């Protein structure tokens, strides 16, 4: 009897709790708080690339949603106000490009070809590797635009019959991977110039790769921003054509 | 973004301070705006668990290949173009 009463009281406070979680202000607060925590943790670890604030925030919020049994749709209903800012923030990448246009002189062709090849390699190897290891067509197609910055990856995925939210996750994961492995891999092939390093970070890792390049060197950051822009464009044009002609 | 670049490319000195300032704020917190979409991993956890192997191999393999392809192409082309334009300078720079 006593126990039953207790669980009923628990149920009603649980219902109130559920309503609080569903408010936009809660999702926004949760997102801001988790991200700020990730930033402080990275500062505490002296800017270690593996302690990525985006990754930490995602893990914290994901864990919270899992523990409270809250669906992603409920969380996203509120967090979409932060998600919306991704568009303007991507557009803002144009500013550092303009500021660094001078440095492009004499290597325009190399930059264009490099970004296009990086974009093509990412899309083709993404689809090919998923299919080679027995993944479904939907996953393969969702993998194709992952090198583009997240809003573009979502849009392209939608248009080619992929799973947009999976493409978003893959784009972010590939950005984190590129940010973490960037210096090691370029050391391996003995590329020591900031310009190819920035271009590679922006092409393979989009926004998050660019964020890493910005923190390494100003020139690398500018070239990464340029690569994000051009690669976004290339991916948006290339992936639909590629998927259309890809053998089923 | 492409439009803004093309508009500003004509007059690079004419970027208003207010635009540069708001761009700076947005870019300094670029990572934050990726978080809501990234939490989508929760919504897709079933699919990812079921096909974790192709997803992981393709994600890691394809990202590394793309990084290397871009860096090597740019590096190779730049040294080729430089050598053609000015052989002495290019070898001296090495």
Image (cartoon, rainbow, N blue to C red):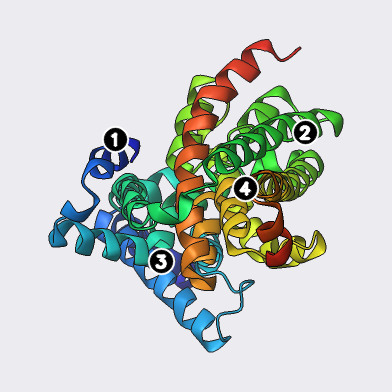
Query: How far is mark 1 from mark 2, CA to CA?
Result: 34 Å
Give the residue at mark 4.
Answer: A204
Do residues under tags 1 and 4 come within 8 Å of each other at their CB atoms? no
- Helix, strand or loop at disc 4? helix
Looking at this view, is B68 or A132 the one in front? B68
Left or right of residue A135, residue A80 in this image: left
Give the residue at mark 1.
Answer: B3
User: Around disc 2, counting alpha carbons within 10 Å, would you say few (fewer than 14), some (14 to 19), or many (20 or more)?
Assistant: many
Query: How far is mark 3 from mark 2, CA to CA?
Result: 46 Å
Q: Residue at x 52, y 67 (%)?
A: A60
Tell which tag, 3 or 2, sits nearer the viewer. 2
Q: Residue at x 27, y 54 (%)?
A: A24
Residue A10, numbered label: 3
Residue A130, numbered label: 2
Left or right of residue B83, residue A109 in this image: left
In the depicted structure, whether residue A84 falls above or below residue A64:
above
Sooner in the amino-acid sequence: mark 3 or mark 4: 3
Query: How far is mark 1 from mark 3, CA to CA?
Result: 55 Å
Do residues under tags 2 and 4 come within 8 Å of each other at their CB atoms? no
* Chain for numbered disc 2: A
Q: Position of residue B16 (x, y in %)?
A: 14, 56
Q: Position of residue A194 (x, y in %)?
A: 59, 64
User: Around disc 4, counting alpha carbons within 10 Å, would you say few (fewer than 14), some (14 to 19), or many (20 or more)?
Assistant: many
Tell which tag, 2 or 4, sits nearer the viewer. 4
In the depicted structure, whether residue A88 falls above or below residue A12:
above
């Amino acid at each position: 009897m006593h126990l039953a009463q207790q669980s009923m009281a628990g149920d009603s406070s649980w219902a109130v709790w559920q309503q609080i979680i569903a408010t936009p202000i809660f999702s926004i607060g949760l997102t801001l708080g988790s991200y700020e925590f990730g930033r402080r943790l990275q500062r505490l670890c002296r800017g270690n690339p593996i302690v990525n604030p985006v990754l930490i925030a995602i893990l914290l919020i994901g864990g919270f949603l899992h523990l409270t049994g809250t669906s992603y749709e409920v969380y996203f209903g509120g967090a979409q106000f932060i998600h919306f800012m991704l568009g303007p923030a991507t557009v803002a990448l144009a500013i550092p490009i303009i500021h660094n246009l001078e440095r492009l002189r004499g290597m325009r062709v190399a930059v264009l070809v490099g970004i296009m090849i990086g974009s093509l390699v990412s899309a083709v190897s993404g689809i090919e590797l998923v299919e080679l290891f027995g993944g479904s067509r939907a996953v393969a197609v969702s993998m194709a635009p992952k090198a583009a910055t997240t809003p573009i990856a979502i849009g392209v995925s939608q248009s080619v019959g992929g799973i947009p939210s999976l493409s978003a996750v893959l784009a972010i994961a590939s950005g984190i991977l590129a940010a973490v492995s960037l210096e090691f891999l370029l050391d391996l092939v003995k590329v020591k110039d900031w310009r190819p390093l920035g271009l590679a970070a922006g092409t393979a890792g989009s926004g998050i790769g660019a964020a890493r390049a910005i923190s390494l060197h100003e020139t690398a950051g500018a070239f990464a921003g340029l690569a994000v822009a051009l690669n976004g464009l290339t991916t948006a044009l290339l992936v639909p054509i590629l998927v259309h002609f890809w053998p089923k | 973004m492409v439009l803004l670049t093309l508009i500003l490319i004509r007059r690079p000195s004419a970027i208003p301070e207010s635009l540069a300032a708001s761009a700076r704020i947005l870019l300094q917190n670029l990572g934050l705006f990726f978080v809501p979409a990234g939490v989508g991993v929760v919504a897709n956890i079933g699919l990812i668990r079921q096909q974790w192997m192709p997803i992981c191999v393709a994600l890691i393999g394809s990202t590394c290949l793309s990084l290397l392809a871009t860096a090597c192409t740019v590096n190779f082309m730049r040294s080729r173009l430089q050598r053609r334009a000015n052989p002495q300078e290019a070898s001296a720079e090495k």
